[in-house]
Image: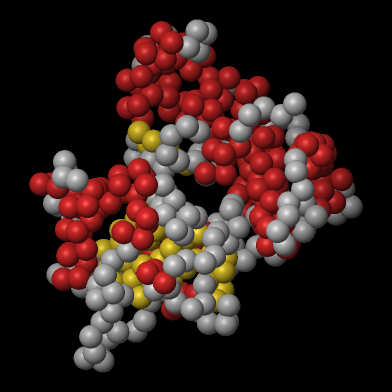
Amino acid sequence: EGAASEDDGDDAGESAGSDHGGSGLTVQLVAQQLRGLGGIGKTEAACQFARRQYNARRYPGGVFWCDGADSESALRDSWRQIAVTDLGMAHLAKEPHEVVVAAVHRWMVAAPHGRWLLVLDNADNPHLPALAACMPPAEADGDVLITSCARGFPHIFRLHDDALVVQLLTPAESQALMLEAASCEVPAAGSEDAEALLWLAGRDGLAGLPLALCHAGAFVRNTEGAGFAEYRRRYEVLLTAFFESGDDASGGAGTAAMYRAQRTVAATWNLSFQAVMDRSPAAGELLQAAAFFAPENIPDEMWLHGASRVAEVVHGSRLATALLESGHMQHCLDRLMGVLADYSLITRRAGTMSMHRLLQQGLRAPPRA
């Protein structure tokens, strides 16, 4: 992941919350933004921070996670899960969203088990009313960590003055991540693969974006006969086509950097997606279909229970055919998702799949001419 650093240089691990122990003062909400480009590793950084702090007993009240905080429907689902599953408020399962939010806020103010952490992940629309409505009251006994690529959050979020900025990886860190993802040793000095690895790890290559670097390494690991030199060749051809067919970014250096990051990631996942389609068209169709759902925790049951219906409405669906003719749909689904996970296109967890929203945006985009 990219390193998180505060604009004024303070340590990121200590700035998402304050030291409240032993002061005897009234504890109030502390809110902090973790900002960075798409694909740079904000969510992973937030996960690691939350895990470390919870294990260190900084948040005895628990860690609560809102996925897709730029979408009203995703916020509603996440907030209901916090209430019903995390806090055991089963009676709220079918109550209106406003009732659920109010009940959770009351719990956050009371904090019966001690201080807690709320993560609002991918809050890329700062002016979304549903997002503002989810912010706990100022007197709540907890911390809020917001991951976002956006600036200009309204005052209601009460954010710490300086955002924690997730930095791009250095060339050395980029090389190490690619080699780890590729499960290979450092190429021989002076070889084409060594030169390509150095280029890919630099600013002219994958520009220190962890998501793109993982895609590249996974491609090399899973594609027979493809080393870093071959990957660079394919990547440059595809990236050139992306830049030639897209509009130039306008709006300053920050906007240009964002467009460059998006296109870098888009080029790497396109190469991985092409490799998946060559290996398993059914797995590729699964990935394409998943792009139209919320990106986090898509349940296996949706694919297993919907296969028959898909076969009825989508003539020649390779995904539905593979599942229905497999004899054991769960094993077949595991195999298809295994192909996608091999190329770092999805993550698998407890009967669900998740994918990066940049990947979803690319899959939903109309084909290029």
Q: Is residue 1 visible?
A: no
Q: Is residue 102 visible?
A: yes
Q: Residue at x 52, y 14 (%)?
A: 318
Write down the quadrant of residue 305 in the picture.
Answer: top left
- Can you name the residue that lies furthest to the bottom here? 23
Figure quadrant of the C terminus: top right
Taking depth in this image into account, of 196 and 107 the one nearest to the observer is 107
Q: Residue at x 58, y 19 (%)?
A: 281
Horizontal side of 369 relative to 363 (left or right) equals right
Residue 254 percent coordinates (x, y): 68, 62
Residue 295 percent coordinates (x, y): 45, 41
Figure quadrant of the N terminus: bottom right
Write down the quadrant of residue 63 in the picture.
Answer: bottom left
Write down the quadrant of residue 15 in the picture.
Answer: bottom left
**Is 70 above or below relative to 161?**
above
**Is 308 above or below relative to 104?**
above
